[in-house]
Amino acid sequence: MTVVVRAAHDFEAVRTMIGPKRPDASVCFCLSHRLPAKQNRSLVGPARGDYVRGLCESEIAPGVLAFDGDEVVGWAGVAPRSETSFARSTKIPHLDDLPVWSVWCLRVRPGHRGKGITASLLDGAVDFARSHGAPVLEGYPSDNGDDRIDLTMAFVGSRAMFEKAGFSYAGATSSLSGGFPRVIMRHDLH
């Protein structure tokens, strides 16, 4: 398997990875951390997809996609922290005044898990943020040790996963995911 990661300008591939099964559903599309809560709640049904289509058509894509040949197999949400709910978070602190970028959602399609796609997504997220001038990329994974993360909460990743991708522990948070504490992991992009 040869995995290629590229900017998420392909809306249909993004929809495959993070869109709801029903087009009229008012869930996911990876918007809960991208938008203020009130705006996120106001986007219902097809308006959510329309909003994400606009993000895909913008100069800076809403994240990165992993492909195995022509098949999309993974997604990572990546953006400047200032453009996400992490900018206002009281549970995930700002460590300094650097204009950091965040990677907050990692998703691999069923049937493709356990093949190193998440590692490719994190490498792609690093390259994507660096190509847009980010000095640092942060992630906020679960610090679950050897304990298993419930699949519905695994989208934040694990500390070990981020460490394998070259990120370093940078600080604690007061946030939990799946019952585990979340930590701040950083990758210097200079």
Image (cartoon, grey):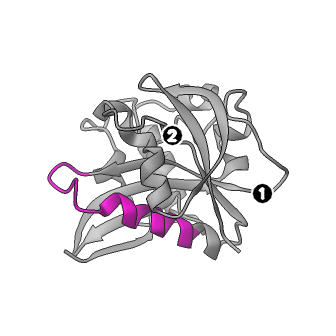
The quarter of the rendered structure image containing the N terminus is: bottom left
Which residue occupies the extreme right position in the image? 97
Side (left or right) of 107 relative to 100: left
Circle nearer the viewer, 2 or 1: 1
Residue, x 72% and y 56% (percent of image)?
100
Residue 28 lies in what quarter of the image? top left
Other residues around mark 1 within 10 Å, as few (<14) / some (14–19) / many (≥20): some
> Nearest the camera: 178 or 60?
178
Residue, x 36% and y 58% (percent of image)?
118
Q: Which residue is mark 2?
A: 31
Task: Please state the extent of the stretch shown in magenta in the rendering.
Answer: 109-128
- The amino acid type of the residue labelled 1 equals Pro
Residue 101 lies in what quarter of the image? bottom right
Badge 1 marks a residue whose secondary structure is: loop
**Would you say residue 73 sits in the magenta stretch?**
no
Whole-percent x and y of residue 184?
A: 62, 44
Whole-percent x and y of residue 190?
A: 71, 75
Residue 182 lies in what quarter of the image? top right
Q: Main secondary structure of the magenta part?
A: helix
> Nearest the camera: 8 or 3?
3
Q: Which residue is mark 1?
A: 99
> Nearest the camera: 175 or 31?
175
